[in-house]
Image (tube, rainbow, N blue to C red):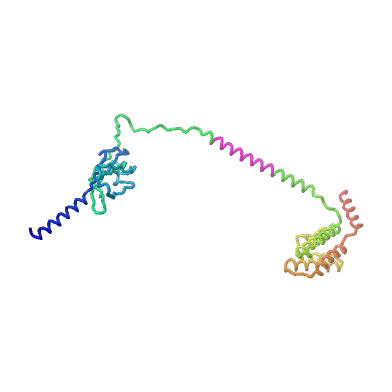
Amino acid sequence: MTIKKITYILILSILCNFSLSAQNFSVQAEIDSVALLIGEQAKLSFLIQQEANSKISQPIFSDTIVTGLEVVERLKPDTLFVSPDEIRVIQSYVVTGFDSALIYVPSYAFGTGMDSAYSNSLTLKILPMPIDTTQQSITDIKPIYKAPFDWNTFFLWVLIIVLIIAAGLAIYFIYKRFKKKDETEESQVVVDNRPPHVIALEKLEEVRSENLWQQGRVKEYYTGLTDVIRLYLFKRYHMSAQESTTAEILSEVNSKKIITDSKANQDLKNVLHLADLVKFAKWSPLPDDNGKAYDSVYEFIQLTKQEESAMSEVKESDVDLKNE
């Protein structure tokens, strides 16, 4: 035997041994029914014959095996020992179909990493649901069902309506009560019939006793002084001084010659102008100016106050006019 022939024999034996070792597993596909009604289920299984210590990669099916054949459940693999060195692994799927059709399940590859084996192909018929129109005409599956009366919902709505009505009544009575209280308080407002200068001097003393400018609250101090003057002008001369500006007040005083005393006129101008500078121009007067402003308001009230005798005559004349 020549060396060339010996070489061929060795190569052939190596290839045969490799082929035998590579093909030492097989796959068989089975299904427990070849025809199903729409919606019925069947079990599709892959039987893998392999060595006990080998690992076989399998195709992974998630929702469908093929179009029209849906996976209902992937069952747990079942392993059987055929011999000490050989096992059979059964991987099964529960499948179903919802459209009538002839479904072809092709062969799938299973591999060891070195070689592959293919499963056999299958066919499965999905049949439509038979309808016997000769025995029974098409009707509703069940008669129209009338839902029972929901008492819980009814009482819940009644409770909600009652609560809304109660809340509305409560709001109405509270409103009426406070409105009546306000009207009562307004009717009970005491009219201060004291002389205007008495009221003004009392308010002026309140401003002085608060020590506003000494606390750095200069703007509030001058606001208090001008409020006293405006209230006094309103009660003494019936001027709308509380809603008027400084210019409007001085213009009315000059045009109607309400105040005849020149010193009183000058005090009024000085206080009102200084107060405007403080409130609107952020002027910072000296402490002496603050004291002089108070004195000017005080002197203005004293110089223009109405004497008690004159006030009595005015009141008597008013009473006579009312009696007539």
Is 228 a magenta residue? no
Find residue 160 and report its horizontal and vertical position in percent.
58, 39
Pick the quarter of the image with the N terminus: bottom left
Residues drawn in magenta: 153-174
Q: Nearer the viewer, residue 93 or 280?
A: 93
* Whether residue 245 can be seen here: no
Q: Nearer the viewer, residue 322 or 56?
A: 56
The answer to whether residue 131 is left or right of residue 148 is left
Q: Residue furthest top?
A: 135
- Name the residue: 34% across, 33% down: 138
- Compared to residue 61, the image places residue 129 above or below, namely above
The answer to whether residue 216 is left or right of residue 82 is right
- Name the residue: 54% across, 35% down: 154
Find residue 11 and report its horizontal and vertical position in percent.
15, 57
Q: Nearer the viewer, residue 64 or 125?
A: 64
Is 166 a magenta residue? yes
Residue 72: image quadrant is top left
Find residue 285 and report its horizontal and vertical position in percent.
77, 70
- Name the residue: 90% across, 59% down: 307
Q: Main secondary structure of the magenta part?
A: helix
The answer to whether residue 53 is left or right of residue 170 is left
Q: Residue furthest right?
A: 309
The answer to whether residue 303 is left or right of residue 219 is right
* Whether residue 301 can be seen here: yes
Q: Nearer the viewer, residue 134 or 13?
A: 13
Find residue 114 and report its horizontal and vertical position in percent.
24, 54
Q: Residue furthest left?
A: 1
